[in-house]
Image (spheres, coloured by chain):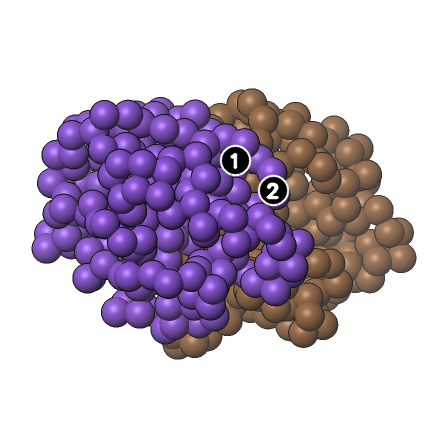
Chain colours: A purple, B brown
Amino acid sequence: MRIICCRFGDKFTDWHVDNLKHMIDNYSGLKYDSFEVIENDIYGNWYNKLQMYDKFRDGENLYFDLDIVIYNKLPNLIRKQFTLLDDTWWREPAHTPLNSSIVSWTGDVSYIWNKFVSNDVFWLDKYNKGSDEFYYKQIVYQTYEPVCPSIKNNMNYKPEEYSICTLGQMQHLMEKGWTGWYSDYFIQR
Amino acid sequence: MIKVCTVFFEGKYSPDYVSKFYDSLKRNTTVPFEFVCLSDTDVKADLVLPYNKHSNIKLHWHKLKFFSPQFAYQKPGDEIIIMDIDQVITKNIDDLINYPVKDNEFISYHTWWPRNIKVNGGFYKFKSGDFDYIWNDFSLNPEYWQTHYYENGDVHYKYYGEQNYVDWKLFEKNITITEVPGEWLGKYTDNKKDMIEMNKLYSKKFNTDYMILDDINEKIKIVHLNGVKNNKIWNIQ
């Protein structure tokens, strides 16, 4: 099984990559064969993530965003079909119900990359709020059952019924100076 | 523990504003405190926290982080003071730093010159966590709030309006603002005409001498600068 993450631009640093690996190795219970980091910045935005479908065309794949907190043993998140999060159990759908903070697939889904890259200028313009809308409108997908709440509804208490939270817009919680239940799981700065 | 919390970012001011402010605080109070600066460069402070230039939080809006009890290693019962660094302390400020604060009480300067909001971002004091909704609500939609007051015409520069937001949240929650005595606060600007008017207003309002002429009025403890070019005011430290 392959763990994948992406790091582009200045927003995230090596610390964030090391931190994800730290949480996976210490709290998730996941056993993996390789930990892959995609850093090739083609588009200057999160459409860069789509490169992973071209690069990893075999075996079991599990992708995580860097702005998450993993604090307990994860449920089985490996999926055969292309699967990502549906957030509408904790938020309004907005322009897409989907969230690609966690993505899994087995085998070859390079058709996603091929479809995007064959007309990338058009898709970037059409779905300019992010790649999750591209998935929503253009790709056949499956979604996880509720497995990953947002920390914004769980700032003061750890949601014990889950084992992973997305930070979403609360990425500042990873900066030095923030202390809460979540910071116990991050690498000390 | 009293935490005096500030924000510095390169641009309008130089890092020596922080060190001068820090030294001035230390020199002019006997009250123990920790000086915290959220800064994008190395500055003189007891605790320096990173100002993340790549974050979606802009300029002075970083000040709002101190309203979260989860920021700056706050502990229950801590008294949090948020101050701007463009201030000159002119005499002992024990009465200001030690100003008594009750649970759910919000303390700010009394702004004695005409203004359309009640709070003054130069000085906030409250108990840790009592107004956490100010940060929590803001952090849910920073893009909206950071341009709201500019688009509304309340402020003249994009990304200004942090004080307006704090003022609004306190109004929304029906919080009465406690004000420290207005005569403690002076205001200094390069504009001579404005200074004449301010001096007259201060004199009339507090039935005393002018605010700042050759010397500083003895009632004044701290002077809030309005503009970056008036460095000569540092001489009065």
Q: Earlier in the sequence, mark 1 or mark 2?
A: 1
Q: Is residue A149 above or below residue A6?
A: below
- Is the residue under label 2 in contact with that under label 1 (CB below 8 Å)? yes
Q: Residues within 10 Å of mark 1 (few under 14, many from 20)?
A: some
Q: Mark 1 is on which residue type?
A: Phe
Residue B155 percent coordinates (x, y): 70, 65
**Residue found at the far right of this picture:** B193
Left/right of residue B142 with respect to residue A151 in the rendered view: right
Residue pointed to by mark 2: A44
Q: Quadrant of residue B175?
A: bottom left
Residue at 31% x, 27% y is A35
* Mark 1 vs mark 2, CA separation in Å: 8 Å
Residue A143 percent coordinates (x, y): 27, 61
Q: Quadrant of residue B156?
A: bottom right
**The N terminus of chain B is located in which quarter?**
top left
Residue pointed to by mark 1: A8
Q: Mark 2 is on which residue type?
A: Gly
Residue at 27% x, 54% y is A81
Residue at 66% x, 47% y is B224
Residue B43 percent coordinates (x, y): 56, 24
Which residue occupies the foreground of this view, B60 or B88?
A: B60
- Label 1 sits on a secondary structure element that is loop
The label shown at residue A155 is: none
Total numbered badges shown on the rendered structure = 2
Which residue occupies the foreground of this view, A188 or B68?
A: A188
Q: Is residue A96 visible?
A: yes
Q: Is residue B183 above or below residue B43?
A: below
